[in-house]
Image: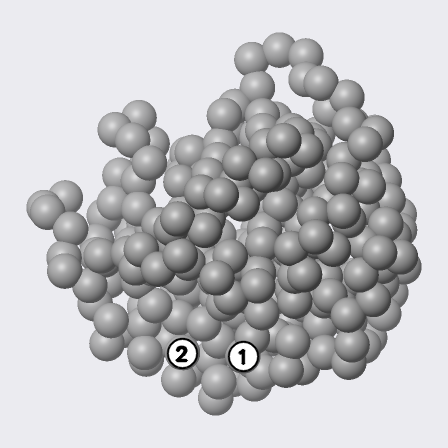
Amino acid sequence: MDKKPTWLKANRLGSKKASEINAYLRSLNLHTVCESAKCPNRGECFDRGTATVMILGEVCTRNCRFCAVEKSKGTLLPADPNEPENIAEMAQKLQLKHLVITTVTRDDLSDGGAGQFVKTINYVHKKCETVSIEVLISDLEGDWNSLRSIVEAKPDIVNHNLETVPRLYPDVRPMAVYERSLDLLRQVKLFDPSMITKSGIMVGLGETEEEVIELMKDLRGVDCNILTIGQYLSPSAEHHPVVEYIHPDLFNRYRDIGEELGFIFVESGPLVRSSYHAEKARDFIKI
């Protein structure tokens, strides 16, 4: 692709504070997806009282071609038993309003890491009664019993990203299954109809506008409530290339279509990532 367009310049708001907080997180042996996935907004979110922590290490068992997170080359470390309590301590110390808990995919664990999610949610609930909790989970390889345990721990939002349109899965997400990801979001609502669900996609990977709209309809078909849409930016020459830089006007169109389809909130823009402006969902949560 040619040089990035001007609308892809990231805001450096809060970058000094972000550096200070990242140092604090490292002192607790905690990781942020902001750093591991090279998010273009990793200077802004802490200023708004939002943090996204990544549990279960920094190495993933999947081989997605869009992601900067390190891929597994052997045996991975077990879950850190201190991690859930450390995250709760961090949320309390930083007086967070909204906490996003995400993870690398851990297909090597029998429950896909669900137990660590449950422990973390429980610790945060005990320490921070007013913080809203969003979990961004893997597909758990379709283990709905593990999914049920996460839902029953009562996060405020369950997020699982479709990432791209189904036609591109074999190339972009070869170890994932589009229908399984949709079914996960459907299952969450079966376990708890009141649970807010969320998903996100990247554009610029070679999808068509019609495919994006069909994906949005698929999400509304499983009663998904919140959608994020952002520009794909290739982390390196070894990753999937950027096929197209999407103009902000089309992002606005996607937002308008999503709202017409019934999403309660659509965050759509070139620099949007799954957790970008995640705290806005608090408007729809009973704390």
Q: Taking 40 as reference, is 259 left or right?
A: right
Q: Residue at x 59, y 51 (%)?
A: 52
- Numbered label attached to residue 70: none
Residue 32 lies, in percent from the top left, at: 56, 41
**Color theme of the render:** one colour
Of residues 126 and 121, which is closer to you in this image?
Answer: 126
Residue 264: image quadrant is bottom right
To which residue does mark 1 refer? 265
Q: How many marks?
A: 2
Q: Compared to 219, does 3 lie above or below?
A: above
Task: Say which label, 1 or 2, has the lower sequence index.
Answer: 2
In the rendered image, residue 255, in percent from the top left (x then y), is placed at 40, 78
Q: Is residue 184 depicted above or below 277 in this figure?
A: above
Q: Nearer the viewer, residue 235 or 164?
A: 235
Please indicate whether residue 81 sits to the left or right of residue 97 in the image: right
Residue under the image location 70 percent in, 47 percent down: 90
Q: Is residue 133 above or below residue 28?
A: below
Which secondary structure, mark 2?
Answer: helix
The residue under label 2 is which amino acid type?
Arg
Answer left or right for 245 relative to 124.
left
Horizontal and vertical percent position of residue 105: 64, 35
At horizontal 46% and vertical 39% (from top left) the residue drawn is 35
Residue identified by numbered label 2: 255
Label 1: how many Cα within 10 Å (few below 14, some 14–19, many 20+): some
Q: From what the image shows, is residue 163 above or below residue 85?
A: below
Residue at (82%, 75%) from the top-left corner? 193
Q: Secondary structure at mark 1?
A: strand
The 10 Å Cα crowd at callout 2, few under 14, some 14 to 19, many 20 or more, is many
| Amino acid, disc 1 | Phe
In the image, is 71 to the left or to the right of 115? left
